[in-house]
Amino acid sequence: MNNFLLTVGWWNFGGSLVMLCTLNEAFGKKLYNEWTKIFKTEFKVDYWSKFWLFWAAGINVIFGLVNIMAVKWGYPEIKEFLIYTDIASYSAFLLLAVWGHIAGRCGSGIYSVYMIFTFWITWAVMSLQSD
């Protein structure tokens, strides 16, 4: 459980920094439209996307730090609860990615998102079974 919580915690913390970097529209376009090709539609930074990016980055920072700190706290019940929360979160993200793909808003890079979210879900389930 500890390895999973630390790794996913740092992943979320790092991801929040990437999200904040996408407040720069030029970087966001490069990241989402050119390099990863996750979005088919052009990435734009307007009022609502700024709101969403700050909200998501803030939640990721908190979520990441809680996952990391849970290892230090050492309470198995909290660790297990957080892993279930991670599974629920990544499952919701996976469904959102499927919805975006079906709606035609995502590009070929969405397949990497499927692999990443499936990886986290699988590792989380395996972590619950191993401890």
Image (spheres, rainbow, N blue to C red):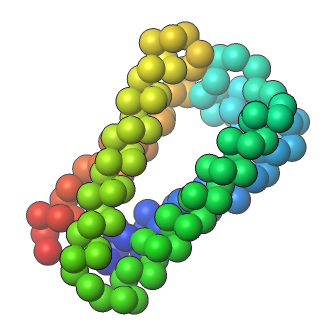
* 83 lies above or below 131: above
Task: Tell me the quadrant of the picture where the N terminus can be found.
Answer: bottom left
Nearer to me, 1 or 111: 1
Left or right relative to 94: residue 131: left
Quadrant of the image occupied by residue 27: top right
The image shows residue 11 at horizontal and vertical percentages of: 52, 61
The image shows residue 95 at horizontal and vertical percentages of: 38, 30
Is residue 30 visible in the rendered image? The answer is no
Name which residue lies at 33% across and 57% down.
85
The image shows residue 10 at horizontal and vertical percentages of: 52, 68
The image shows residue 129 at horizontal and vertical percentages of: 12, 64
Name which residue lies at 42% across and 44% down.
116
Quadrant of the image occupied by residue 86: bottom left
Q: How many marks?
A: 0
Left or right relative to 5: residue 23: right
Is residue 38 visible in the rendered image? The answer is yes
Left or right relative to 91: residue 62: right
Name which residue lies at 82% across and 45% down.
23
* 120 lies above or below 128: above
Left or right relative to 60: residue 74: left
Name which residue lies at 18% across and 59% down.
126
Task: Tell me the quadrant of the picture where the C terminus can be found.
Answer: bottom left
Nearer to me, 106 or 86: 86
* 57 lies above or below 70: above
